[in-house]
Image (cartoon, rainbow, N blue to C red):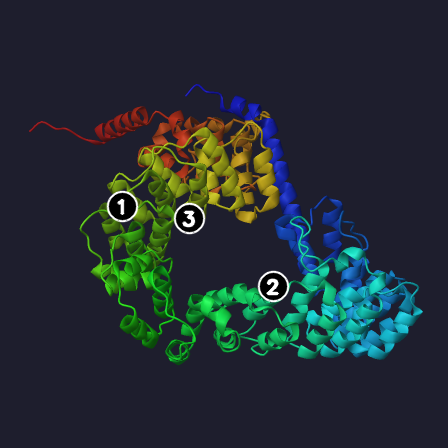
């Protein structure tokens, strides 16, 4: 082959330099994270000075500090400055406060840490029951310098000191945040104190805190007092809820909204809804939303309350309330509401929703009652088979005689997804399966592959009427399994060209082997998709896929910035090794004259700095090969086992430099060996065209024939 491989390598010198620099940087980043994790502070400092990025791999190095609370860590981190991370060295101090490590706390306190750090430490100490640590911190933290976090810690754990701290402050504390936080942790004593303070000092808060309850900005969201109402309700502390309502009646959300929230909480806090209904006394017409909500969530206790106390309004919203009652363990509440004429039975579509609720809740008694009272009609069955709930759909077709093919064969595809063999066995195969709902089909195929049922996969591919969208989606899923791909090829399911999205699945599964198989099937990999594929392979640490790309000389854009970014974002050692190994195969070394060294040498293949490696990089391997081949016992396997520090074998280096033919002289070395198989098995396919394998085979055959002729003796009889 006449192409100058060294010239190609020179043309890519800038690309190669950028990539190798990114590999080195990624290794520094990993090393820094490892040093931080193992608390090897000298190494961490050294790597940080060398430019390691702490935010590499999801800030792994910073997360490691959550378990560090030593003085040595504080001293070391004081020498590490990370932009955007203020006072990194305070982190071990805060961890020490949480754990009660007094030695680290005393060191930090002697270093005159700022009030913000001391306040956070006080909160962590008291919140984690580290009393000695809390006492120590209080000696160094004046009341007037305390942040809201420290004040809240005093409110919960040192209430007497809380009052002292408030008196010593020059400005009013944020009682809104104190009360909100107290509600969040459901500390009733802290809620009582902070609510009283909030009421007393409400005039100190910004006016927008107290916007009318109906106010809601699509840009700013609900006003703070509305959010606070939700927090108060979720505590379930009725006394505190009443006190909050009494203190801020003009700032409450509208009653209809409060009752909806109370309905949502009625299963866990059943006393809340009746209490708020009595407290707020909403108009019955304001309860429609809450009643509908009860039906959506199956809130039985809320439905019972509405039926009993707001009967007239409940009758107007009978269907959602009946749906809620069906969620009870038995049919008694549902049947009683109808038999006692509290709620009327609906008709048509609304009746179908009750059937659906009974099926979904496995309430057989309610379902039988409905069947007795509301005979099934084609309209009801259609509503059920069009449901989004698989259980309801299946019941409609299998038990009520509905259309099995409704909603694009949803029952089949959802049954396949859930491995419902009984339903699949019943499903009629009177026509091709619809694949119009591509997402539903894809979910089913994913579940099927997860179960490893390849035989069923082939049956489904042949029995379905494939849309273009479904075919593309499912092909992407089939990339996760080679047996599935074999079936796809058998049934003409492969695309003409690979797409960007396909590369993610290829990288996650078969990698280079899958790409090679697809290429053999005639699936095209365009330059643009290959470029994206190389980036994805780096991010997914798919070393085999990286190797395939380089071996076939595809995927390398002129601008390496995407690859550099991928190396710096998520690449781990498998990708770093693969990139480094393949890129350095093209690295051009100074072709110094080492002929005399070769002439004098007696050993050649002895490690990463051996004469064989240097000769390969210097494009002077032919002379070394001729001498090495004359030595007794020379084994060509050394051409593969001898590798440089990056893992490149002699054979791979020669291939990258366009010098594979150098190993074939003298040809006599190969007369008892299969040179063709040796080269093909140990080098990437892109290097094979350097060798004329037909001519090589003919030459070796001629050599072997000549040897045989010399050894044969012909005599006349």
- Neighbor class of circle 1 (other Cα within 10 Å; few <14, some 14-19, many 20+) is some
What residue is pinned by disc 1?
A: 487
Instruction: Name the residue nearer the viewer: 185 or 352.
Output: 352
Residue at x 81%, y 57% (from the top left corner): 206
* Residue 53 falls left or right of residue 451: right
Label 2 vs 3, first from the N-terminus: 2
What residue is pinned by disc 2?
A: 257
Q: Secondary structure at mark 2?
A: helix
Residue 468, percent from left and from top = 33, 38
Disc 1/disc 2 C-alpha distance (Å) = 56 Å
- Quadrant of the image for the C terminus? top left
Q: Is residue 368 above or below residue 417?
A: below
Residue 408, percent from left and from top = 30, 49
Instruction: Name the residue nearer the viewer: 520 or 646.
Output: 520
Q: Does the rendering let one see residue 187?
A: no
What residue is pinned by disc 3?
A: 509
Residue at x 66%, y 46% (from the top left corner): 28
Mark 1 against mark 2, which lies toward the viewer?
2
Residue 196, percent from left and from top = 80, 73
Disc 3/disc 1 C-alpha distance (Å) = 17 Å
Residue furthest to the front? 312
């Amino acid at each position: 082959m006449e192409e100058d491989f060294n010239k190609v390598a020179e043309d890519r010198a800038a690309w190669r330099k950028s990539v190798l620099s990114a590999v080195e940087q990624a290794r520094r980043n990993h090393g820094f994270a490892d040093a931080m994790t193992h608390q090897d502070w000298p190494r961490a400092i050294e790597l940080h000075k060398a430019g390691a990025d702490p935010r590499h791999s999801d800030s792994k190095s910073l997360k490691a500090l959550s378990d560090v609370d030593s003085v040595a860590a504080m001293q070391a981190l004081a020498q590490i400055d990370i932009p955007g991370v203020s006072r990194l060295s305070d982190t071990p101090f805060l961890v020490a406060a949480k754990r009660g490590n007094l030695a680290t706390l005393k060191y930090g306190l002697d270093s005159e840490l700022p009030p913000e750090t001391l306040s956070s430490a006080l909160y962590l100490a008291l919140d984690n029951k580290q009393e000695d640590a809390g006492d120590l911190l209080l000696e160094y933290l004046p009341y007037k310098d305390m942040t809201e976090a420290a004040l809240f810690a005093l409110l919960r754990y040192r209430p007497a000191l809380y009052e002292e701290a408030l008196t010593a402050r020059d400005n009013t504390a944020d009682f809104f945040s104190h009360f909100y936080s107290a509600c969040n942790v459901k500390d009733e004593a802290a809620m009582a104190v902070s609510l009283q303070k909030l009421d007393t000092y409400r005039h100190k808060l910004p006016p927008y805190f107290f916007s009318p309850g109906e106010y809601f900005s699509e840009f700013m969201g609900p006003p703070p007092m509305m959010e606070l109402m939700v927090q108060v309700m979720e505590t379930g502390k009725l006394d505190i809820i009443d006190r909050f309502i009494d203190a801020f009646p003009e700032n409450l959300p509208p009653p209809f909204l409060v009752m909806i929230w109370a309905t949502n909480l009625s299963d866990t806090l059943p006393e809340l809804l009746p209490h708020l209904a009595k407290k707020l006394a909403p108009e019955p017409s304001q309860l429609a939303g809450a009643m509908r909500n009860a039906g959506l969530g199956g809130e039985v206790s809320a439905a019972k309350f509405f039926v009993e106390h707001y009967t007239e309004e409940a009758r107007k919203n009978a269907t959602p309330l009946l749906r809620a009652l069906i969620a009870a363990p038995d049919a008694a509440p549902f049947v009683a509401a109808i038999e006692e004429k509290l709620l009327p039975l609906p008709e048509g579509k609304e009746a179908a929703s009750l059937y659906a609720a009974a099926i979904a809740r496995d309430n057989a008694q309610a379902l039988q009652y409905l069947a007795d009272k509301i005979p099934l009609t084609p309209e009801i069955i259609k509503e059920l088979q069009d449901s989004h709930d698989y259980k309801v759909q299946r019941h409609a077709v299998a038990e009520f005689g509905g259309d099995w093919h409704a909603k694009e064969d949803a029952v089949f595809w959802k049954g396949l997804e859930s491995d419902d063999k009984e339903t699949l066995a019943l499903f009629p195969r009177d026509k091709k399966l619809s694949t119009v709902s591509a997402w539903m089909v894809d979910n089913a195929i994913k579940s099927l592959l997860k179960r490893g049922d390849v035989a069923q996969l082939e049956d489904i591919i042949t029995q379905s009427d494939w849309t273009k969208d479904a075919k593309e989606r499912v092909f992407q899923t089939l990339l996760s399994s080679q047996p599935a791909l074999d079936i796809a090829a058998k049934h003409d399911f492969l695309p003409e060209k690979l797409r960007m999205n396909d590369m993610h699945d290829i990288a996650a599964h078969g990698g280079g082997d899958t790409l090679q198989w697809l290429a053999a099937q005639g699936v095209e990999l365009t330059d643009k998709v290959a470029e994206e594929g190389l980036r994805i392979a780096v991010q997914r640490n798919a070393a085999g896929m990286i190797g395939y790309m380089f071996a076939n000389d595809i995927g390398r854009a002129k601008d390496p910035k995407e690859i550099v970014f991928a190396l710096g974002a998520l690449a781990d050692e498998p990708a770093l090794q693969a990139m480094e190994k393949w890129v350095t195969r093209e690295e051009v070394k100074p072709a110094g004259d080492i002929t005399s060294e070769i002439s004098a040498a007696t050993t050649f293949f002895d490690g990463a700095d051996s004469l064989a490696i240097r000769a390969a990089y210097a494009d002077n391997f032919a002379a070394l090969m001729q001498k090495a081949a004359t030595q007794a016992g020379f084994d060509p396997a050394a051409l593969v086992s001898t590798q440089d520090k990056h893992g490149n074998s002699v054979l791979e280096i020669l291939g990258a430099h366009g010098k594979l033919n150098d190993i074939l002289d003298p040809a006599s070395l190969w007369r008892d060996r299969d040179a063709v198989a040796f080269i093909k098995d140990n080098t990437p396919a892109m290097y094979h065209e350097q060798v004329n394998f037909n001519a090589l085979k003919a030459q070796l055959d001629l050599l072997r024939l000549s040897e045989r002729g010399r050894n044969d003796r012909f005599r006349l009889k």
